[in-house]
Image (cartoon, rainbow, N blue to C red):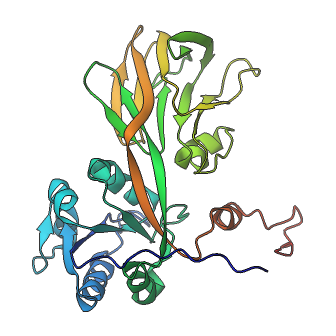
């Protein structure tokens, strides 16, 4: 097999490096202790000649008062790198807050799937110093900018969803592309997803997987009334407008994190954000290997692993 070409950057100059973590509830009320991995990373950074900073909310969660802390604005303005510990949700939360500052992010997986957080906590003593030395691959991910009212924009790394909220009845939605009516349908809702989010909710709803290098968004109806309503992929320079034509209740969800109530006649306008997220991956990162591993593509219907080529 031919060797993968190596991509080296100059070492990261001595600077503050931030650590952000989000505890993940498991087994009822039990919360995973994030203090040990955060403090271990801080020691690694110090040994490499970098000043460790803990994100303000993380410092409160782990009750650490011995390491300097900064809020998102301070991290964006002062830090040269952010290390996010947790699952993809943690990285996405951090990325939304820091996208405007163009700070690169490294993800350390302590979640379940880990499409974005591809470093293992078990080997950070080796992997983090390598990245600091410039041994990484940089990938830039597009974001969605969503607005319901003029002048108020929300960033989404995965998706924006318009659905029926808590109502039991379907919603009637209209989709316009670049100010031209495209189609209308009745459904539980619709997902507009980035390439990053194409392996999240959109995939569960039957949408296509979009490679991160493809400049596209996908529009995926959720349980449409007419089975002929299918997902559609559009260029990411398109302006997408979702109008609530008829609904007892409707809600717009931004990355499943921020919720905006909608009423009949309201429209959500979506376009590619000016900001992009910079992810630093290890040199052996392979997007398609991640898909094979996380989605179980190496398994046959009989449950036997096929040979890897």
Q: Where is residue 182 in the image (x, y as percent from the top left)?
A: 61, 13
Answer with left or right where residue 276 lies relative to residue 283.
left
Res 61 visible? yes
Query: In the rendered view of the protein, which quadrant contains the C terminus?
Result: bottom right
Q: Which of 187 and 136 is in front in this view?
A: 136
Q: Position of residue 133 (x, y in %)?
A: 39, 82
Query: In the rendered view of the protein, which quadrant contains the N terminus?
Result: bottom right
229 to 38, vertically: above or below = above
Identified at 49% across, 26% down, the residue is 163
Identified at 44% across, 89% down, the residue is 126
Identified at 31% across, 54% down, the residue is 102
Q: Position of residue 248 (x, y in %)?
A: 45, 12
Q: Quadrant of residue 175?
A: top right
Q: Nearer the viewer, residue 26 or 177?
A: 177
Answer with left or right where residue 284 lies relative to residue 276.
right
Q: Which of 240 and 25 is in front in this view?
A: 240
Give the residue furthest to the bottom: 47
Q: Position of residue 289 (x, y in %)?
A: 68, 67
Answer with left or right where residue 160 lies relative to residue 66.
right
Identified at 57% across, 45% down, the residue is 195
134 to 149, vertically: above or below = below
132 to 243, vertically: above or below = below
Res 246 visible? no
Give the residue furthest to the front: 10
Q: Nearer the viewer, residue 91 or 180?
A: 180
């Amino acid at each position: 097999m031919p060797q993968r070409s190596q991509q080296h950057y100059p070492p990261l100059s001595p600077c503050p490096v931030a650590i952000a973590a989000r505890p993940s509830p498991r087994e009822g009320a039990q919360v995973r202790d994030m203090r040990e991995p955060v403090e271990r990373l801080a020691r690694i950074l110090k040994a490499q000649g970098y000043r460790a900073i803990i994100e303000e909310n993380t410092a409160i969660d782990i009750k650490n008062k011995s390491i300097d802390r900064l809020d998102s604005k301070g991290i964006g303005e002062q830090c040269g790198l952010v290390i996010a510990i947790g699952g993809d949700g943690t990285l996405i939360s951090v990325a939304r807050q820091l996208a405007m500052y163009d700070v690169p992010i490294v993800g350390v997986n302590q979640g379940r799937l880990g499409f974005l957080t591809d470093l293992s906590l078990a080997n950070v003593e080796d992997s983090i110093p390598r990245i600091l030395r410039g041994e990484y691959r940089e990938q830039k991910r597009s974001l969605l900018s969503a607005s319901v009212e003029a002048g108020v924009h929300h960033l989404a790394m995965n998706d924006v969803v318009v659905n029926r909220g808590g109502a039991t009845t379907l919603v009637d939605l209209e989709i316009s592309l670049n100010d031209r009516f495209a189609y209308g349908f009745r459904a539980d809702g619709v997902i507009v997803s980035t390439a990053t989010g194409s392996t999240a909710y959109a995939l569960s709803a039957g949408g296509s997987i979009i490679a991160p290098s493809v400049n596209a968004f996908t529009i995926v109806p959720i349980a449409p009334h007419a089975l002929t309503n299918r997902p559609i992929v559009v260029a990411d320079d398109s302006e997408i407008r979702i109008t609530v034509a008829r609904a007892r209740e409707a809600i717009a969800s931004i990355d499943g994190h921020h919720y905006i109530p909608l009423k009949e006649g309201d429209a959500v306008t979506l376009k590619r954000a000016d900001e992009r997220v910079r992810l630093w991956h290890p040199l052996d990162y392979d997007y398609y290997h991640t898909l094979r591993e996380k989605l179980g593509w190496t398994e046959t219907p009989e449950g036997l692993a096929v040979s890897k080529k």
